[in-house]
Structures are given as structure tokens and as C-alpha cells.
Image (spheres, rainbow, N blue to C red):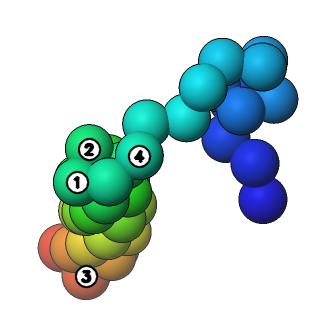
Amino acid sequence: MKSCCEEAGAPAPQGPVRRLLSYLLYAAVAAGLGIVLWQQFQA
């Protein structure tokens, strides 16, 4: 699965920067799912 930057032909960040971005992405997805599930239980 390519990111938008790789598809556009821009050089992808390497090393700790790329790792940090991926961690932030996973954290955002997990937070979104957590909020949705929490709202479902609150209803």
C-alpha cells in the first residue's frame, strides 16, 4: 500500500521520521475507533 506522497513521486521520508509518521497514523486510527465505540456504548 503506497502513501499519497509516494504515489505523487515525492521522496518518502526515511528512518525515524517515517516511523514516527506511521505511529501517528496508527494512533489516529485507534483513537477514531475508540471514540466511535465509546459513543456507541454511551448511547
Q: Which residue is mark 2?
A: 17
Q: Which residue is mark 1?
A: 16
SS for tag 1?
Answer: helix
Whether tag 1 and tag 2 are in contact, CB under 8 A, the answer is yes
Instruction: Name the kind of residue labelled 4 in the image.
Output: Gln
Front residue (pair 26, 16): 16
Q: Position of residue 33 (x, y in %)?
A: 37, 68
Taking the image as shown, residue 43 lies to the left or right of residue 11, namely left
Instruction: Name the kind of residue labelled 2 in the image.
Output: Val
Instruction: Name the kind of residue labelled 3 in the image.
Output: Phe
Would residue 7 be visible to someone looking at this image?
yes
Instruction: Name the kind of residue labelled 1 in the image.
Output: Pro
Front residue (pair 6, 41): 6
Q: Residue at x 41, y 46 (%)?
A: 14
- Image quadrant occupied by the N terminus: bottom right
Q: Which quadrant of the figure has residue 17?
A: top left
